[in-house]
Amino acid sequence: MAKPNAFYAQSGGVTAVINASACGVIETARQNRDRIGKVYAGRNGILGALTEELIDTGRESARAIRGLRSTPSGAFGSCRYKLRSLEENKREYRRLIDVFAAHDIRYFFYNGGGDSQDTANKVSQLGETLGFPITCIGIPKTVDNDLPLTDCCPGFGSVAKYVAVSTREAALDVASMCETSTKVFILEVMGRHAGWIAAAAGLAQEKRGDAPHIIILPEVPFHKGRFLAKVKRTVRERGYCVIVVSEGAQYKNGRFVADAGTKDAFGHTQLGGVAPTIAAMIKERFGYKYHWAVADYLQRAARHVASATDVEQAYALGKAAVEFALTGKNAVMPTIVRTNDKPYRWKIGEAKLERVANVERKMPKSYISSDGFGITAAARRYLAPLIEGEDYPAYKNGLPRYVRFENKLVAKKLKAFRV
Amino acid sequence: MAKPNAFYAQSGGVTAVINASACGVIETARQNRDRIGKVYAGRNGILGALTEELIDTGRESARAIRGLRSTPSGAFGSCRYKLRSLEENKREYRRLIDVFAAHDIRYFFYNGGGDSQDTANKVSQLGETLGFPITCIGIPKTVDNDLPLTDCCPGFGSVAKYVAVSTREAALDVASMCETSTKVFILEVMGRHAGWIAAAAGLAQEKRGDAPHIIILPEVPFHKGRFLAKVKRTVRERGYCVIVVSEGAQYKNGRFVADAGTKDAFGHTQLGGVAPTIAAMIKERFGYKYHWAVADYLQRAARHVASATDVEQAYALGKAAVEFALTGKNAVMPTIVRTNDKPYRWKIGEAKLERVANVERKMPKSYISSDGFGITAAARRYLAPLIEGEDYPAYKNGLPRYVRFENKLVAKKLKAFRV
């Protein structure tokens, strides 16, 4: 009898290290050729399973697969697609079974955030409810660091490092020019509901009074008066003010700060960022010269300045997922368990998918300073190890050498399916 | 008789490598202690000379000065301040002479862009017109790469590398998500009058059809219809479209594209960037999901991904400036002369300050592709060597270890002066 095959897919927003998890999965499966046949990657995540668009990762050399470890983005394509419940949409689940059966797939590895772990959990129920046994393991991933039951999420450490490094660098720039030029600099970072990424900018501080002087978190209702007072005080005392703001910053009533009620020339609501919005507030009140930056995808794709800790954990979680599957576990996700802060020690743990799915972890109150504009020593203790270590990609002609696969699809065996 | 002292100052927008030039100046002066006494740095550029705010760089250890080589921003403070002509403002020139005389300063090194070389040139005239002999050497610096008579400007190569790396990384991100998510990504970069920085993003391309698909340069009048047609074609053919746009992109009539006539809630003109403006254009016409980033200061401060070529040249120009002064040259600026493209070879040349001052070098037409949205092979040949090589700073606790000086001022000998 042929060995069962595995299906691996990437889901949701990609990161600098999700391919490192893919590398962990594929390399570990290759080390277990006696028990796992092919590793098929879904083209564009779970969509690839529904549309029977499968990529045979076996066509790629060991060297190319190794290259995944230092390549950002999703090498096989990712997607934003959430499976509805079995009751609501049995048709899609039946299709998954058809595809898995047609290609002898008995292992399902799904690499993503909260929504994706929900999908993975639903797929794991195929065995019980539809009589198709499949081993289903989730692999955590999200720059937002908002999954429960794991100490941190792969992808976050590298964004955190990017944001801390960029804040330190830009702050030096502003400090050296503030006498005659820009006095306020604002960096907008990701984080719609949780402020982990903005909080990580606080690591840029070496001593009291260092930038960033103000961090705006979604967890703390934005109060314009208190914010502007702090900007003024900082400029008076330090000569300049560096602000890092979460895209999800919001007022007490839940309205996003970015939604400033501005209209474009056609009368449509201006889809601006929160950075230009608060820059305008500051200009309006004080007239300070300002600059702002919006890092957007640059932050989550910045493999060139990835955290070595993050890369290592992403790989280890991919590896653990395969090992879990081979020891007969099902409907679980490997996690990071912190065993010591300093020196930092961690090990792989395990969480049930049903407990991970759709739970969002925000910053604890104890991580936020009393005025709401900074982070505490406890937050530093938590965050600092996650950005530790550099893991530079190889360069060629002055640019990182990232792998790009052809991703040819294996021959389809089934009729087309409309998603 | 005591040896004469030197004055060094940083001017205009700072860069990732202007401190490497400072390092070259100070280290070379220290190697010539028999001929140069102290090196005073001006606090906040030429302002430090006018206000007699001088920093004795001799207080810093050899190790700290070496650290300048890998620290971005201006370690002694920079300024935006342009000296008027001698005829218009003799008072300031007399003040410079007073300060230089009081502190035995006979060498003047000024590290900056076009305006700054104009200032340096004016200071060099002090000898002839006001009878105070001073040796005056300019040191080029500008991320805009727009100085004439030098093959390139220190600071540019590192921004170019940052922009090319970031474009390659963000493009991989977009490519992996475009099936179900963002189809258009726009990165706004610096370059008010010259498109060198945006052009450098073109280096991210490995093969035909790679991102960036569209580069918008200030040198090419922006034509909305042609632009939108190219966006549509690219999304149709590639599935996504990556655009890099100069902040200075403008219409045929000279109006900035960023000036979209938008108003904020108070009725003031919205000071938005060009990236959100063209994002809105695309949304309006096609409804594509988009994302945009504005790199702003992050790009010019990004020492963590500096070009080794750029760092080396910045240092060499600082060193050459001191050597020029010691061989009796005056009113000149060391330059970079390219002697070969591949393998890249360069040497130090020399230009008269009067020929450098206030001349702006734009991208030659031969570097711009026929449709105006890309770069040519000639541009690649020019740009590629400038981003070559990595020169990573040392890290501590996951962050670059940048030097920061106390910058205590030497005792003043003169009465206060109102600038």
Image (cartoon, coloured by chain):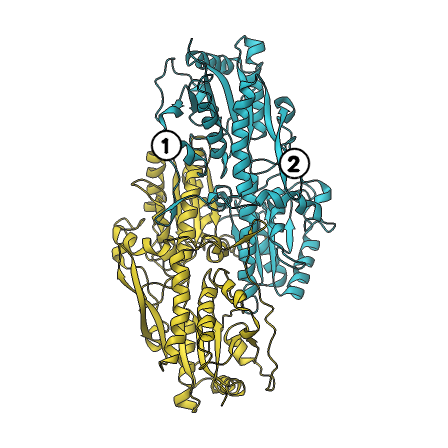
Chain colours: A cyan, B yellow
Residue A117 place in picture, x, y as percent: 57, 25
Residue at (34, 41) in percent of width and height: B210
Label 1, on which residue?
A405
The foreground one among B328 and A123 is B328
Q: In the displayed structure, would residue B127 be above or below residue A417?
A: below
Left or right? Give the position of B225 relative to A334.
left
Residue B308 place in picture, x, y as percent: 40, 56
The foreground one among A175 and B63 is B63
Label 2, on which residue?
A338
> Local crowd at mark 2 within 10 Å, few (<14), some, or many (≥20)?
some
Q: Are marks 2 and 1 on the same chain?
A: yes
Chain ID of residue with mark 1: A
Left or right? Give the position of A65 relative to A180.
left
Residue B380 place in picture, x, y as percent: 29, 52
Location of residue A282 by image quarter:
bottom right
Residue A401 place in picture, x, y as percent: 38, 42
The foreground one among B119 and A60 is A60
Q: Which of marks 2 and 1 is in front?
A: 2
SS for callout 2:
strand
Q: In the displayed structure, would residue B256 be above or below residue B30?
A: above
Amino acid marked by disc 2: Arg
SS for callout 1:
loop
Asked if marks 2 and 1 touch (Cβ < 8 Å), the reply is: no
State how many labels appear.
2
Amino acid marked by disc 1: Phe
Res A284 visible: yes
Residue at (62, 50) in percent of width and height: A203
> Extreme bottom residue here?
B131
